Image (tube, coloured by chain):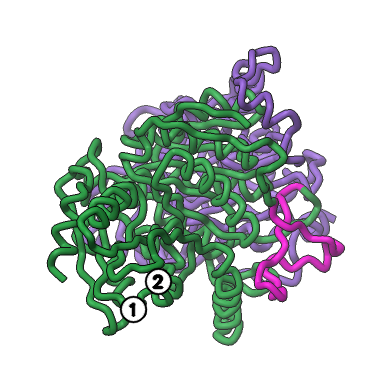
Chain colours: A green, B purple
Amino acid sequence: MIKKMMHGNEACAYGAIIAGCRFFAGYPITPSSEIAEELAVLLPQVEGKFIQMEDEIASMAAILGASLNGIKSLTATSGPGFSLKQENIGYACQTEIPCVIVNVQRGGPSTGSPTMPSQEDFMQSRWGTHGDHFIVVLSPSSVQETFDLTVKSFNISEKYRTPVILLMDEIVGHMTEKMILPEPGEIEIIDRKKPSVKPEDFRPYENTEDGVPPMAAFGSGYRHHVTGLMHDETGFPTNNSEIIQKQKDRWKKKFDLARDTVVFTELTDAEDMEYLVFSYGSSARCTRKAVKIARENGLKVGSMKALTLWPFPGKELEKVSRGLKGIVVAEMNMGQAIREVERAVGKNVKVLGANRYDGESMHPDDILSVIEKF
Amino acid sequence: MKTEIVLSYLRKDKLPHIWCPGCGHGIILGSMMRAVHKTGWKKDDIALVSGIGCSSRTPGYVDFNTLHTTHGRSLAFAAGIKFSNPRLNVISVMGDGDAVAIGGNHFIHAARRNLNITALVFNNYIYGMTGGQFSPTTPYKAIASTTPYGNIDKNFDIPSLAIGAGAGFVARSTAIHVPGLDDIIYQALNYDGFSVVEIISFCHVQYGKRNKLKTPLSMIDWLKSIALPIAAYEKLGEEQRRDKIPIGIFKNIPTEEYSQKYIKEIIDPNKSKDSILKDYCKAKLYDL
């Protein structure tokens, strides 16, 4: 066990390398640049590759190229760069290439507030690229969680052949606090499954029982074709509507089966709660304080922190919402997760938003003043 | 015999290809396969990467590790493949719009960076797949579906662009100078660094029909009349050079390849290791 003071971006870099990441491509952008800087130092020490590309589009393309070689790959960015990456995030969804994309959020739209915290990319992280697709989004609220969720992001991406977005925010990225690294053997590390059939029998998009086809690295003897066009089980383009629907249904099956293993939430002060504060990322830190103050004032308030944003933990939320007098959704945007919360709990519980979108971090009063409205 | 060589590299069950009868791209594909055959590379060790467009359908027909990416991004994907596994021989196939319009940024930076990738630009002066819009290489005054009154855009000279961006091997040939094309592609494949070959192809369907070159034969005759060896081109006066295209190798100088430089200068096993990584990364976590 190692105890160390670190900032969030640094913890992300260590988490990536310990998870097995050996390739990073990126483009400088505040407030995520320290991830690139840290990996420029660390990756060569483990014979990994670091490359600074000409833009975010190219960085996203490069990590997919590396992942096709069987190498765990990462890129990191913020709002404007996240928008540029969407093109090839869609390619990763279509071709099921494992990779991890970190977005250390800033306020937007456009250049917005590069040095100020925000959680305005909640919806973009799910629906940023065009077309029907599935994706997993995790969001840490502390340095420790940044490390843990970076490792988990790689594991999920490898296990389910999917891009995973690690949605950080400026506060978590730049905050320094204590982090505990478990013993090396105690960290679960998952690698993608490889084909065991003869190369001529290999079908890169086979409809397996779990919906996850084995993946062969380029150069491993399993020559195959990868395309962003809709394709059949062999990987070649198709216009056959029956096959297109089958492929998309398999994606859905894969994510339906994966759902419960990738959704993480933390429920606190729930035993006697009459009100619940739902939050994620750095807003969840503020929620903790707000709940404490509310309880000191005699209000029975509990909280749910979502570590997974997508798939949205609606099921978990619905279960604990029955009989509540109200739910507050605390987030640093004009109200994004609140739509999902309302959808999950229906009309049975009143839902109000505590929103901060002026570039300042959430304050406990922002939440307490909303609880008073019920 | 030569046909058999080409066929031995193709995914025969994927034929016939989608290119229109009379398209120049199939001839270039043949040249590529003969050049690859001459290198002796194993199919397993070759990655063929493309973007979007007519030429970018090439990888689907070839029995290598093949990747059909997003529009303009071929070289960016290729960079990730080559840099992460330098053992692979990486070839990137692009069209004119793919390489120097939407992918222009990746093109110049690939030339500057100098990873060992062979970039083959199939230039047919037009966006064929989308129905004949003008591209950055469409000649002045030419008619396209989006230049109905004649093109007023200045066009790119791809070899000059590649040389300006720092590529070490730069050449141009055409789909009708086949023995020469075979040799130029072979030299480009063998070059240790970023190499660019512009190959003038022809599209009578989208370009020719709008520009008084309605048949493949008339396009071939046109190419014959405009292409000449670099040495012959240089002897011409400025007025005579107009409408002519020099073909051959413009630049071929040894350079230091990027991934080799990275391995030599950046990865140093004797460098002191970060204390955390010492405990957590004793062994390589992946095995290629």
- Are the residues under badges 2 and 1 in a single subunit? yes
Q: Does residue A269 appear anywhere in the picture?
A: yes
Q: Height in image: A79 above or below A329?
A: above
Q: Mark 2–mark 1 contact, CB under 8 Å?
A: yes
- For the residues labelled 2 and 1, the Cα–Cα distance comes to 7 Å
Q: Which mark is residue A317?
A: 2
- Whether the magenta-drawn stretch holds residue A204 is answered as yes
- Whether the magenta-drawn stretch holds residue A90 is answered as no
Q: Does residue B151 appear anywhere in the picture?
A: no
Q: Which mark is residue A345?
A: 1
| Residue B4 spot, x, y in % from top left | 83, 59
Identify residue type, mark 2: Leu
The quarter of the image holding the C terminus of chain A is bottom left
Q: Height in image: B184 above or below A200?
A: above
Secondary structure, mark 1, is helix
* Residue A176 placement, left or right of B256: left
| Residue B3 spot, x, y in % from top left | 79, 58
In-front residue for pair A289/A163: A289
Q: Chain of mark 2?
A: A
Q: Quadrant of residue B235?
A: top left
- The segment highlighted magenta reads A191-219
Identify which residue is drawn at 24% across, 36% down: A115
Q: Which mark is residue B157?
A: none
Secondary structure, mark 2, is helix
In-front residue for pair B170/B106: B106
In-front residue for pair A349/B36: A349
Identify residue type, mark 1: Val
